[in-house]
Amino acid sequence: MMIIKTSYISIILSIFCFVSASAKWNESTSIPESLVGKWNVVQFHSVRKDAYPKKQGVTIQIDADGMTTGFVGCNRIRTSCVVDDDSIHFGTILSTRKFCQKEYMDVEDYMKEVLSNSNMFILKNNMLTLFSGKKKLVTFSKE
């Protein structure tokens, strides 16, 4: 009888922990309205201005639930986004697998690296700048 009571208690505690964790996860994936929308790359920082001439058309779309999609030069991407105050983190980046010219693939590789390494942001005058620590990575304008 004691084993059955212990099992019930374990199950109830497990469900409680799962529900609590789910509620916290849902709460943390809420994206501020000012970040929701489509963002176009304006400038890659920490590289020569002419290093990626094919950056036109590179975009990300951040949704209110944190789902982030985009076009990174050749392929489309999908990832998650979590924001807490001025910190931002993107999850594992999934991508279509088309092969394009080297200059497009270079932009794509750099953009994936930027999103993977981003941990802070500044939003000012409809311009979104992503950082890794104090290092600027990329600036977007809101569409």
Image: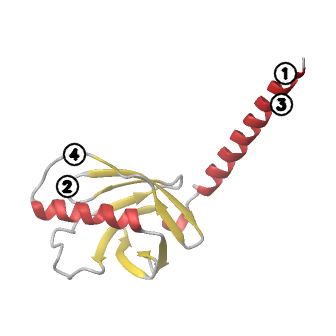
In this view, the mark in front (1 or 2)? 1
| Callout 4 secondary element | loop
Mark 3 or mark 4: whose residue is earlier in sequence: 3
The residue pinned by badge 3 equals 9
In this view, the mark in front (1 or 3)? 1
Q: Position of residue 119 (x, y in %)?
A: 47, 69
Say whether marks 1 and 4 touch (CB < 8 Å): no
* Nearest to the observer: residue 33 or residue 88: 88
In this view, the mark in front (3 or 2)? 3
Say whether marks 3 and 2 touch (CB < 8 Å): no
Going by the numbered disc 3, the residue's amino acid type is: Ile
- Residue pushed farthest right? 1
The residue pinned by badge 4 equals 97
The residue pinned by badge 2 equals 74
Mark 3 or mark 2: whose residue is earlier in sequence: 3
Marks 1 and 4, how far apart in space? 53 Å
Q: Residue at x 29, y 64 (%)?
A: 111
Mark 2 or mark 4: whose residue is earlier in sequence: 2
Marks 3 and 4, how far apart in space? 48 Å
Mark 1 or mark 3: whose residue is earlier in sequence: 1
Q: Position of residue 87 (x, y in %)?
A: 54, 70
Mark 1 or mark 2: whose residue is earlier in sequence: 1
Badge number at residue 3: 1
Mark 1 or mark 4: whose residue is earlier in sequence: 1
Marks 1 and 3, how far apart in space? 10 Å
| Callout 2 secondary element | loop
On the question of residue 129 being in view, the answer is no
Going by the numbered disc 2, the residue's amino acid type is: Cys
In this view, the mark in front (2 or 4)? 4
